[in-house]
Structures are given as C-alpha cells and as structure tokens.
Image (cartoon, grey):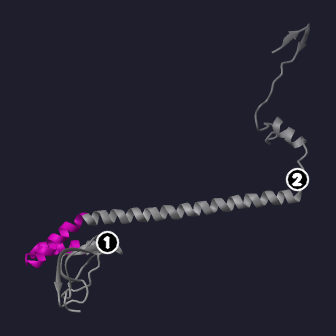
Amino acid sequence: MNTRENGSEQEPVIRDNRKIDPETGQARETVKEKERADQPAPETAPDELSTQLAERTADLQRLQAEYSNYRKRVERDRTLVKEQAVAGVLAELLPVLDDIGRARDHGELTGGFAKVSESLEAATGKLGLSAFGTKGEPFDPMVHEALMHSYSPDVTEPTCTEILQPGYRIGERVLRPARVAVAEPEEPAPGDN
C-alpha cells in the first residue's frame, strides 16, 4: 500500500513477528532478550553466592524431609485404616463364630456345615483373628470380663474357672474380652490370725 503524506509517498511499515527467521531458519531474539543481553550481569560476591547456595540447599533438604515424613505418615495411615477395616469386619463375624462354637460343643457341627465352619475359621485366622481364654489361667481384667465371682480353696490367685464366651484379638488388639467365671482364694475367717 502506498500512502501520501505531506505530498510525498511513503512505504508502509511491515513488522515480521515470527519467532523463526524464514531466511536463516534460526530463532530470532526478541526485543526483551536484546535488552537483557545489552545490560551487564550484576556482580555478586563469591561469599554472597555461597550464602545463597547454602540457603537453597537447606530449603531443598527441608522439602525432602517434609516429603519423606509425608510419605511415612500416609503409609502409616493407610496401614491403620486397613487394620481398622479388617477389625470391623471380624467384629461383625464374632456372633457367627460363637454360634459355630456352641454347635461344636453340642455335637451339632456335622456334614457340610462342618466344612463351612472350618473354612470360615481358617479365613478369619488368616486375617489375624485368634481366640483366647482358657480354663485355669490367671484372671487379667485387661483381657477378661468377669461375669461370675466365687471363692475357692483350690486357687491361690484370682483364676478363670469357666470360659463362658471366648475372647478374640487381632495381634495385640483385643476385639472382645473373654467372658469368664472367676474364683478367688477363700478369705480367712475373722478369728484366724
């Protein structure tokens, strides 16, 4: 396009904003890059550079430690959630295991039902469920629940004389305490000193 200004002809101004020069195939420098290249690099002292390097290194180490702690916390939480889920499911199965135990005690555990009960007990065992509470063991209020109490000359300490309902645990976690009858040593008569 030709235009006339003040009586003279001027050529139009065409700006090529492409990043690659079509003639050479090289990347063109932008105006900002040219300005930066023309400015001298700021002078920094070597001790200032080493201080900056130490700060960046400390920041990086701190971030790595935070990430490592985060990974450990997530893994610990994941394990805890898994254990709680397994414990919740097994706690719901305890009445079924009690019914199987009562059927076994009464001789009613026969045929196909016996195989099913064995499979269920094996599966809960693989998940870490174990029964506890035996006749004659010392009474421990942390794992036993006393439903009956008596005195006996046959014991020297509080002892479980009957297991009314077995207790269950996963590892060290008690899902249900064993329900027991407890016998204590007979109290001495008031005049026996």
- For the residue labelled by badge 2, is the local secondary structure a helix, a strand or a loop? loop
Q: Which mark is residue 74?
A: none
- For the residue labelled by badge 1, is the local secondary structure a helix, a strand or a loop? strand
Residue 73, image x, y percentages: 51, 62
**Vertical placement of 94 versus 28: above or below?**
below
Identify the residue at image location x=17%, y=90%: 153
**Vertical placement of 167 versus 78: above or below?**
below
Which residue is denoted by mark 1 in the rendering? 174
Which residue is denoted by mark 2 in the rendering? 44
Choose between 17 and 96: the one closer to the eye. Answer: 96
Choose between 36 and 68: the one closer to the eye. Answer: 68
Quadrant for residue 174, please give it: bottom left
Identify the residue at image location x=17%, y=71%: 98
Is residue 109 shown in magenta?
Answer: yes
Task: Name the outermost residue toward the bottom.
Answer: 193
User: In the image, which residues are magenta?
Assistant: 92-121
